[in-house]
Image: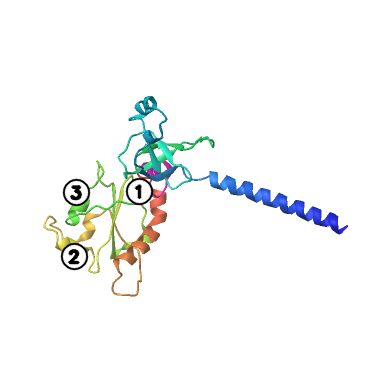
Amino acid sequence: MKKLERQRAQEKQAKRQEEEEEAAAQRSNQGRPYTLSVALPGSILDNAQSPELRTYLAGHGSLVNCGMKKEVKIDKKLDPGLRVTVRLNQQQLPECKTYKGTVVSSQDPRTKAGLYWGYTVRLASCLSAVFAEAPFQDGYDLTIGTSERGSSVASTQLPNFRHALVVFGGLQGLEAGVDADPNLEVADPSVLFDFYVNTCPSQGSRTIRTEEAILISLAALQPGLTQGGARPT
């Protein structure tokens, strides 16, 4: 009787282990179709088995390191060390020595898949340059200034938009940025924005540090930005 019970227990344990291994394999095969990669020296030419194949492969692609078990063969020849965004092919052959992918714009994960893909930094010489030197052809179609003298963010209804700009001041507020800008002839910062909002009413302190205001404001604006705006392109 005990022998039969031990046998059943072993069978259950083996079945459980098999199910866990299958689940782990499925998790390893799932993931986002995009990855950041670095081009490797030598590309695919070093793996060519003959001069004829090396000649054919010249200019046809590169190998990139995506931090995966296999390197990824892409469709473009790149300089070694170049950092690129790669979209992995949905269908991969397990028996192949490499994965396959395509080099895409670094904006694709954000605009096509809604994924956070890092950020870029743009240096503006003054407050007006933040607006005038927008990286988008039509500029920003929604501008939001943040200030303790703004209207309550809770009562703000944001419209649809493609490119939104949220501006934060330093310890002296946006007024200091307006005063220091030789290109602006206004004294009230609120006239520069579509919306001028207070994202932390009853803050209880004289000032809020900018790095704290960013987290507070983005959390307060997130529902309105999600409802009012389509995903930026």
As displayed, is residue 156 above or below residue 201? above
- In the picture, the quarter occupied by the C terminus is top left
Specify whether residue 230 is in view.
no
Nearer to the camera, 226 or 42? 42
Q: Is residue 63 above or below residue 127?
A: above
Left or right: 98, with 205 as reference point? right
Segment colored magenta: 107-118
* Residue at the image position 30 percent from the left and 40 percent from the top: 79
- Identify the mark nearer the N-term, 2 or 1: 1
Q: Where in the figure is residue 199, as x and y percent of width and height?
A: 35, 63
Q: On the image, numbered disc 1 is attached to which residue?
A: 159
Asked which secondary structure carries label 3, the reply is helix
Amino acid on which the number 3 mark rests in the picture: Ala
Return the residue found at the far bottom. 205
Residue furthest to the right: 1
Closest to the camera, between mark 1 and mark 3, is 3
* Residue type pointed to by label 1: Pro
**Separation (CA) of disc 2 from disc 1:** 28 Å
Q: Which residue is mark 3?
A: 132
Residue 176: assigned label: 2
Residue 41 lies, in percent from the top left, at: 34, 41
Residue 219 percent across, percent down from the top left: 40, 60
Q: CA distance from mark 1 to mark 3?
A: 22 Å
